[in-house]
Image: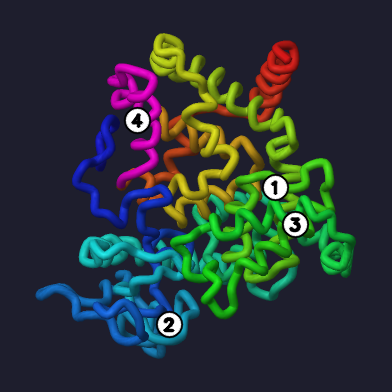
Amino acid sequence: MEPAGRPRDRVPRWARGGRGAPRPAWGVGCGMGTWVVGCEWVGSGGEGRGAPPPPPAGRSRFPSPPPRAHAASSPRGPRARAKLYLGLTGSFSSRCRIDPYGFERPEDFDYAAYEEFFSAYLVILTRRAMKWSKLLKGGGGVQKSGTVKRYIRKGVPLEHRAHVWMGVSGAQARMDQNPGYYHRLLQGECSGRLEEAIWTDMNRTFPDNVKFRKSADPCLQKTLYNVLVAYGRHNQGVGYCQGMNFIAGYLVLITKSEEKSFWLLDALVGRILPDYYSPAMLGLKTDQEVLGELVRTKLPAVAALMDRHGVLWTLVVSRWFICLFVDVLPVETVLRIWDCLFSEGSKILFRVALTLIKHHQAFILEASSVADTCERFKEITRGSFVTECHTFMQKIFSEPGSLSMATITRLRESCRARLLAQG
């Protein structure tokens, strides 16, 4: 287990987060490992579809199956059992240059380390997928309950993610109550300024994702553009704000639906994170100050360091909040966080932030300047601690300790009043 302090230096490249880092091939099941289905393999020539290279000597291409007894009629072999549990079809490969979400892996991607990691995680993936399938058997909507909350905290399988998010966030109910509304928004009058601002950001949104490139068929840039334009017309008080493109981009990748992405964006921007993306961004500024107050209470040594060096919280955590950890943490870790965000609300963001800071408190306290402090806050978002999403999600509900919505509401009121008084 990685000790608290400096993130592990020898962690493989696939385990590092952030925009410049590769995205592990995560997505099927509830956690980080996945069987990649029908991926494109980019060979030494840089293009083309084909089989991945053979695994290293002595290593199987496929992880071992979970140690579970099955009836005599059950399929045998790791691939057959994985298909049975996870509902997959097609060929398996963990050596694709493109991960299931379309993000490119670098040339030095450590496939052997990834396969070893996934092998250990397959048992959890299988167990969670089976439980969700039983819970959702029969179809119908997803309603909040103690069981659903517990299941969500342990991860939502990719195949059910859009359905669960739509249900627990209230987005499905809004969409059902407003049939045709999204398409009417797209047919509305152009403002010019809104559309231009959104289109300007299209090429800046996930340039390392093949699905958002103009050469892709279909190209998700147009889908993303439609979602953002519709939302800007729907919520004219917000319009469009940088950061919303990354959030909507993830929604498009997961739901594969413009209309569902629109209503989930409305749930986030309109209800779960009010005033984060308004022109004054008062909600965003308030929550950064709330985090500072929580750190002052729970991690006073870190708060003292920030005061001593004169580091403002907005310098080190603004991207965490405005992008909801997109392009900050690994893809599947972000999705696991969003599972809980749609279910339990914005307090999840504070739990994630406090866990990152607490786990690496000793490392942060070694900072000797403003620049060093900012760099260390970047470092703590990388490494195996954030890559191993199942363990990480368990930590966010234990390491920060008690954190009630009543406490957050009280701190928001006082921090908001202070910011308004400052003008």
Place of residue 101 in the rendered image (x, y in percent of width and height, measured from the top left): 48, 67
Q: What's the image's color scheme?
A: rainbow
Q: Which amino acid does label 2 sit on?
A: Gly
Q: Is mark 2 on a helix, strand or loop?
A: loop
Lower position in the chain sequence, tag 1 or tag 2: 2
The residue labelled by disc 3 is 195
The residue labelled by disc 1 is 268
Q: Which amino acid does label 1 sit on?
A: Leu
Q: Residues within 10 Å of mark 2 (few under 14, many from 20)?
A: some
State which region is magenta: 358-383
Q: Is mark 4 on a helix, strand or loop?
A: helix
Residue 272 painted magenta: no
Q: What residue type is labelled 3?
A: Glu
Q: Can residue 135 be seen in this view?
A: no
- Label tally: 4
Q: Which residue appears at 61% of the width and 66% of the height?
A: 221
Left or right for 236, reference 148: right
The residue labelled by disc 2 is 38
Mark 1 vs mark 3, CA separation in Å:
21 Å
Q: What is the number of the mark on residue 113? A: none
Q: Which residue appears at 31% of the width and 47% of the height?
A: 384
Place of residue 211 in the rendered image (x, y in percent of width and height, measured from the top left): 52, 70
Q: Do the residues labelled 1 and 4 touch (CB within 8 Å)?
A: no
| Depicted 182 relative to depicted 371: above or below | below
Lower position in the chain sequence, tag 3 or tag 2: 2
The residue labelled by disc 4 is 376
Lower position in the chain sequence, tag 1 or tag 4: 1
